Amino acid sequence: MRFFIKQIQALKRAARLILYRSVERDVVARFHKLYYHGRQRGLSWGDTYWLGTQVLKCPLDLWLYQELIQDYRPDLVIETGTYMGGSAKFIASIFDLVGHGEIVSIDINPREGRPDHDRITYVTGSSVDPDIVELVREMAKGKPKVMVILDSNHEKSHVDAEIAVFKDLIQPGGYLVVEDTHLNGNPIRDEFGPGPMEAVEEFLRSTNEFETDPAGTKFFMTFNPHGLLKRIG
Ligand SMILES: C[S@@+](CC[C@H](N)C(=O)[O-])C[C@H]1O[C@@H](n2cnc3c(N)ncnc32)[C@H](O)[C@@H]1O
């Protein structure tokens, strides 16, 4: 009898946990949609600045970058998609605080008014243009700790091409961040079509060298679910 009571209690606990997880997922997805669409009202990620420069990110994701930089201490961050330079400036500021690192930020569109910083190099051109890739590879030479952040064109074919050209610059222990995996219904913009999430899924099916780092979702909401990839081999 005592055995059956214990079994029933264990089943109840398991059911409560399943219910809790599903409520949790729902709350996170609803807040994610509220936050994402807040930009249309001039709020949230459309009105976010790092030391005066606009940055198109969720602050929780920026905080995660701060922790990764503190722990991993990259020599070089390669960022695709500069926009106003806010994310490059954020990373350069953290590099200043830890006393190490530089960032190269690539954008197809030049823009006036991007912040000047000794640790930032801006490169104008497509992130998958062979000449640009060669230039960036030269900059990565002799730098064992490279971290890559993909935040340019979010169509799957482009993200696939970016992963293909930059992945081998990352050493075991290093990071590849595929941003905006939340597109195409994960949970926002159902209509987007194949994007970063689908590129990540296909990439992870093709390799044993990278895996999703669960730290990427530790703040519950991230614009990059399953997009923080760590090189393990
Ligand atoms: C989402 S914004 C980048 C936001 C920036 N990283 C931030 O967090 O503030 C995307 C940028 O990618 C650039 N872009 C689009 N296609 C590109 C390509 N093929 N190569 C490089 N940059 C591209 C756009 O010009 C735009 O500035």
Image (cartoon, helix red, strand yellow):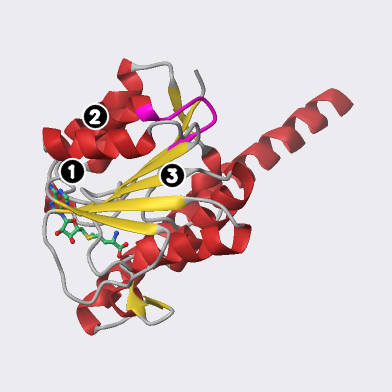
Q: Which residue is mark 2?
A: 165
As rendered, which of 20 and 200 lies closer to the eye? 200
Mark 1 CB near ligand 1 (8 Å cut): yes
Q: Earlier in the sequence, mark 3 or mark 1?
A: 3
As rendered, which of 161 and 98 lies closer to the eye? 98
Q: Is residue 170 magenta?
A: yes
Three-letter code, disc 2: Val
Circle 3 residues within 10 Å: few <14, some 14–19, many ≥20 = many
Give the CA separation, mark 2 to mark 3. 16 Å
Q: Position of residue 19 (x, y in %)?
A: 54, 48
Q: Position of residue 64 (x, y in %)?
A: 52, 55
Look at the image and tell me in which quarter the N terminus lies. Answer: top right
Please identify, in this view, whether the residue under mark 3 or under mark 1 is nearer the observer. 3
Q: Which residue is mark 1?
A: 127
Q: Is residue 217 above or below residue 141?
A: below
Give the CA separation, mark 3 to mark 1. 16 Å
- Which span is picked out in magenta? 169-175
Q: Is residue 181 above or below residue 11?
A: below
Q: Residue at x 75, y 28 (%)?
A: 7
Asked if residue 232 shows in the view, the reply is yes
**Residues under numbered marks 1 and 2 in contact, where contact means CB atoms less than 8 Å apart:** yes
As rendered, which of 61 and 167 lies closer to the eye? 167
Circle 2 residues within 10 Å: few <14, some 14–19, many ≥20 = some
Q: Which residue is mark 3?
A: 76
